[in-house]
Every structure is written in structure tokens, then in C-alpha cells.
Amino acid sequence: MPRTINRDELAQRLREAAERRLPHALAWLRELVGVNSFTTNAAGVAEQARLTAAGFAALGFEAETVPALQAGHGPHLFLRRRGSNPASDGLPVVLVEGEMD
């Protein structure tokens, strides 16, 4: 039978996990904000999409880019990840929307 943990222990474990990952997360954030991804800088928006897709690939997400309808604009990025719980089929999907420019 799995061991249960109390809220304080869970909070401590989450804090420690976040602290271990912080240097990598900050390096990725520095790389992201260092890209000129202004709307009409199509190459910069495409680079932002590439970096974002690479970061989320490590979490099991699949990326799809769709060309923008407006000439000179960068692509749209869609990230998808199927849940690991077969019982979740048919449940609502969570959509997270963000801007790369």
C-alpha cells in the first residue's frame, strides 16, 4: 500500500524539487527573453516557437507550427500532450494560450 504524506512534507518535497530545477529554468527563461520575437520579426517568432517546443518536448508535449495568415508574421505554435490516465478519456481538455511576441 502506498505511503501517504502530510501536507507539510509534500510542500517541502515540492520546494526542494523546484529549487533543484531553478537554475535550468532560469537559463531557459534567459534564452527565451533574449529572442527578439516582435510580431513582424518572423524569424524571431519562429525561434521562440522552436525554443518553446524544445522545452516542452522534455515534458512529453508534441509541437505543431502553423504558418501565420499575415505576411511577414511568425508561425503559431500548438503543443499537445495526451494524459497518462486512461480513465481521463472524455474529460475536459485544458488549453493554455500564450503569446510569443
Image: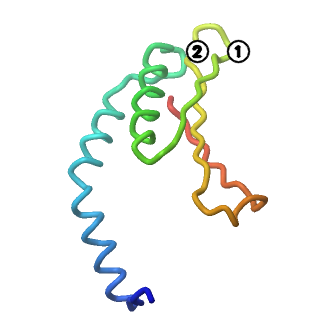
Residue bearing mark 2: 73
Kindly identify the residue that appears in the image at 38 percent across and 89 percent down: 5
User: Residue 90: x, y in percent?
Assistant: 78, 59
Tags 1 and 2 touching, CB below 8 Å: yes
**Left or right: 20, with 94 as reference point:** left
Quadrant (top left, top right, bottom left, bottom right) of the N terminus: bottom left
Quadrant of residue 27 within the rendered picture: top left
Q: Where is residue 8 in the image (x, y as percent from the top left)?
A: 34, 88
Residue furthest toward the right?
A: 90
Tell whether 11 sits left or right of 41: left
* Left or right: residue 47 compared with residue 29: right
Observer-nearest residue: 99 or 83? 83
**Along the line of sight, which residue is nearer the eye, 55 or 39?**
55
Please report the residue visible at 45 percent of the width from the left and 42 percent of the height from the top: 56
Question: CA–CA distance between discs 1 and 2?
Answer: 8 Å
- The secondary element bearing badge 2 is classed as loop
Q: Is residue 18 above or below residue 24?
A: below
Which residue is disc 1 drawn over? 69
Badge 1 marks a residue whose secondary structure is loop
Q: What residue type is labelled 2?
A: His
Q: What residue type is labelled 1?
A: Leu
Please state the horizontal and vertical placement of residue 65, each as a whole percent of the image. 58, 24
In depth, the one of 63 and 26 nearer the eye is 63
What residue appears at the point 48 percent right and 14 percent down from the top-left corner?
A: 41
Q: Provide residue 98's location: percent of width, then percent of height.
A: 56, 41
Check the image and name the residue furthest to the top.
71
Mark 1 is surrounded, within 10 Å at the Cα level, by few (under 14), some (14 to 19) or many (20 or more) other residues, namely: few
Q: In the figure, 97 relative to 7: above or below?
A: above
Task: Please name the residue shown 43% across and 86% down the image.
Answer: 2
Q: Is residue 44 above or below residue 27?
A: above
Residue at the outermost front position = 1
Disc number for residue 84: none
